[in-house]
Image (cartoon, helix red, strand yellow):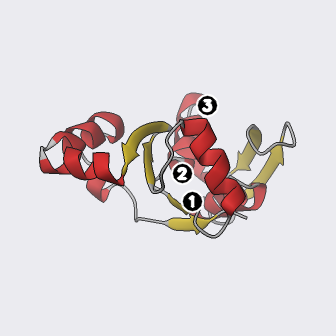
Amino acid sequence: MAVDRLRSLLEQAFPGSEVDVQDRTGGGDHFQVTVASARFDGLPLIEQHRLVNQALAAPLGVDVLPDPRIRQELSAVSSWPTIPQVFVRGELIGGADIVEELAQNGELERTLEEKLGPDYRGAAPERVVTVT
């Protein structure tokens, strides 16, 4: 996820806050995030971290079709040759055929509840982003 996209998500979650995002490695795989928000007043540090993580971990779809480099890297990382691929909390669930089968036998629902919690359907609005 790009620095600008992370900053945008945090600014939406914490309007009026000071947000700083830095790419620690330059490779887009390790970020340092600082959020100064009145919403954190009186909260323990662990609760502040939970709120930031929650803002960044909301359901998110990434449209990889426009960029062949992203598709190639995704397939290499996941060891899955076809697109689309479904990931939940960073874990590959499978391609479209596997996900369809899981949905038909009820296992997809169980997997999503296990990974996202029982209230995952209403937890956050669906978002799809284009990675550039």
Q: Residues within 10 Å of mark 3 (few under 14, many from 20)?
A: few
Front position in the image: 92 or 88: 92
Residue type at the position of mark 2:
Ala
114 relative to 79 in the view: left or right = left
In percent of width and height, residue 81 lies at: 51, 46
- Residues under labels 2 and 1: Cα distance? 6 Å
| Nearer mark to the viewer, of 2 and 3 | 2
- Which residue is denoted by mark 1 in the rendering? 13
- Which residue is denoted by mark 3 in the rendering? 45
In percent of width and height, residue 45 lies at: 61, 31
* Residue 31 picture quarter: top right
Q: Residue at x 59, y 62 (%)?
A: 64
Q: Residue at x 77, y 55 (%)?
A: 3
91 relative to 3 in the view: left or right = left
Front position in the image: 37 or 84: 84
Residue type at the position of mark 1:
Ala
Q: Residues within 10 Å of mark 1 (few under 14, many from 20)?
A: some
SS class of the residue under badge 3? Answer: helix
In percent of width and height, residue 16 lies at: 68, 65
Q: Is residue 42 visible?
A: no
Q: Which of pointers 2 and 3 lies earlier in the amino acid sequence?
A: 3
Q: Which of pointers 2 and 1 lies earlier in the amino acid sequence?
A: 1
Is there CB contact under 8 Å for labels 2 and 1?
yes
Q: Residue at x 63, y 70 (%)?
A: 66
Residue type at the position of mark 3:
Leu
Image quarter where the C terminus lies is: bottom right
Front position in the image: 88 or 102: 102
Q: Is residue 53 visible?
A: yes
- Which residue is denoted by mark 2 in the rendering? 55
| Nearer mark to the viewer, of 3 and 1 | 1
Q: Which of pointers 3 and 1 lies earlier in the amino acid sequence?
A: 1
- Residues under labels 2 and 3: Cα distance? 16 Å
